[in-house]
Amino acid sequence: MDWSIVATLVGGLGVGSTISTYLTSGRSRREVKGAVLEKLSSVEAARWAGPSDPVPFSDFIAACRALETAALIARVPRRALLHYLKYAHAARLNSEANWERYGEEEVGGFISNGISEAVRDSAETLTQVVWSPWSRVGLRWRLASDSTKIFRFSDKEDREYIENAQKRLGGL
């Protein structure tokens, strides 16, 4: 059979346009995913309180909203996003409290180890979910495991920051 006939048949069946659409949409998918990671970086920068470059809490909230919008466009699972935002809020609250408590440039504004580890792990999970659809398999179990781990290894004060962040975000 002649290849020109096969090409004509494939094009006539619409397979060619489907393949073409899929291949050309790859770039826009990467751009949307890149926007999510860019907004994630903005939230990470805004979750620190302190003297060097103070970010008002309202700017932190705006960065969180921008991340939510980008994640919605990229079809990131909301559960993974809210998991990250919970720990990012807890980290910001912890950083502000430590800045008010100590107020020194060297010590003030730090984030406790338990919360810092939790926000880092949840940011890593969110990044994996953004880039790989296969990482969504078992996501609910991983998030539940992360939550259990942080409550088991954190001190009472860390848990209070996390619970306060959950209340601010509507319970989660």
Image (tube, rainbow, N blue to C red):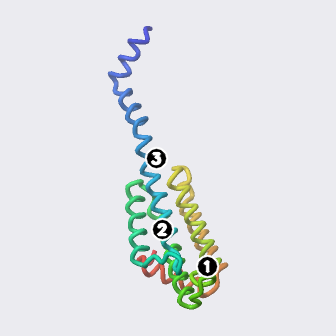
- Would you name the residue on which mark 1 appears? 151
Identify the amino acid type marked 3.
Arg
> Looking at the image, do the residues carrying marks 1 and 3 touch, with CB atoms under 8 Å apart?
no
Identify the amino acid type marked 1.
Phe
Give the side of residue 50 with respect to residue 12, left or right: right
- Would you name the residue on which mark 2 appears? 43
**Residue 133 at x, y = what percent?**
51, 50
Please tell me which residue lies in front, 125 or 52: 52
First in sequence: mark 3 or mark 2? Answer: 3
Identify the amino acid type marked 2.
Val
**What's the distance in space between the residues labelled 1 and 3, CA to CA?**
35 Å
**What's the distance in space between the residues labelled 1 and 2, CA to CA?**
23 Å
Q: Is residue 75 visible?
A: yes
> Extreme left residue here?
12
Could you say whether the residue bearing mark 3 is in a helix, strand or loop? helix
Give the side of residue 30 with respect to residue 154, left or right: left
Res 45 label: none
Could you say whether the residue bearing mark 1 is in a helix, strand or loop? helix
**Residue 7 at x, y = what percent?**
39, 17
Residue at (58%, 64%) from the top-left corner? 141
Residue at (57%, 70%) from the top-left corner? 119
Quarter of the image containing the N terminus? top left
**Residue 21 at x, y = what percent?**
37, 35
